[in-house]
Image (tube, rainbow, N blue to C red):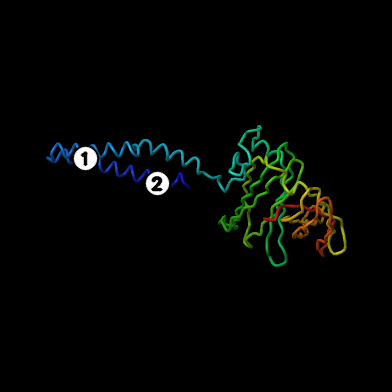
Amino acid sequence: MKQKKKFKTGVRISALLISLTVAAGCLAGCGVSESDYKSLERRVSALEEMYGSDSGSSKKSSSNASSDSTPNPKSTARPSSGSNNDSASGSSGFDPETVGQDIDVDEYDYVDDNGSKFAFFVFDNKSEFNVNVQVDIECKDESGKSLKTDDEMIRGLEKGKRSYVGFELDKNTDTIVRTLNYTEFSGRTSVISDVTARASKAQGGANLTIINNGSNGTDDLKYLTLFFKGSDLAGFDSGEVPNISPNTNSTIPSVFYGDYDTVDVLIAEDK
């Protein structure tokens, strides 16, 4: 934002220089004394020294257009860079496009009995890097009209780990356009990396066993339980993970009254 403001100021200064230069030219041809003309020329010259010329402002405009650009929201490709890096881009050979090819993404869509629509994206990091995952979505109706945009982020998805983001969609959504942005995470171990979870079939849903292998409690975590009938998503349940002490576990019920064959549970930060 500072760069944009700076450029706008530059535009106003350039316009002032142009007007004074034109005025000087007009005065020179209108019988104005040579001393007045030279005085005006000196004012123009002084302003140019203080603020630069139009050519300098044009270069800054081009630079700002590049630095302030954002990925095309219609693109479903994984952009090659982002602003959420915890380390300098490329510092350890990290290439977002290459890394993105090693991260499996499964999308599950669900419509409940009230017509509410949901979308879940499950990420399985099979790359050699710990990553942040920025997910931007755009909901469109049948005619292609944009209905809603939303975004979520997974911070610190370590290699070999899984996590998810979930969205409640506009009820008229026909198509979801998603944009994924991967950046390298090189901070300390994230909270989700210390937690493992498993689900077992039970009457009225499933029992979730959540194990805290870390040295801190499990504050600000949530779970998503996906219930499948064959390969179709039959339903889901979600909620907060209770505060589990270090090196202990907790079993909590996940409610679902429909018929299902298999169940999967995922953990994410609850921001």
Task: Name the foreground residue: 123 vs 10.
Answer: 10
Query: Which quarter of the figure has residue 90?
Result: top right
N-term-proximal mark, 2 vs 1: 2
Numbered badge on residue 8: 2
Query: Label 2 amino acid?
Result: Lys
Q: Is residue 261 left or right of residue 57?
A: right
* Distance (Cα) linking label 2 and label 1: 25 Å
Residue 164 position within the rendered picture, expressed as x and y whole percent measured from the top left: 72, 51
Write the residue at 43% across / 47% down.
Answer: 5
Query: Label 1 amino acid?
Result: Leu
Callout 1: few (<14), some (14-19), or many (20+) C-alpha neighbours within 10 Å?
some
Residue 72 position within the rendered picture, expressed as x and y whole percent measured from the top left: 55, 46
Write the residue at 27% across / 36% down.
Answer: 45
Q: Which is more foreground, mark 2 or mark 1?
A: 1
Q: Is residue 10 left or right of residue 149?
A: left
Residue occupying the far bottom of the picture:
114
Query: Which quarter of the figure has residue 141?
Result: bottom right
The residue pinned by badge 1 equals: 40
Write the residue at 74% across / 59% down.
Answer: 240
Callout 2: few (<14), some (14-19), or many (20+) C-alpha neighbours within 10 Å?
few
Task: Name the foreground residue: 112 vs 156.
Answer: 156
Q: Secondary structure at mark 1?
A: helix
Q: Is residue 206 left or right of residue 8?
A: right
Instruction: Note whether 27 is above or below 139 in the view shown.
Output: above
Instruction: Note whether 161 is above or below 217 in the view shown.
Output: above
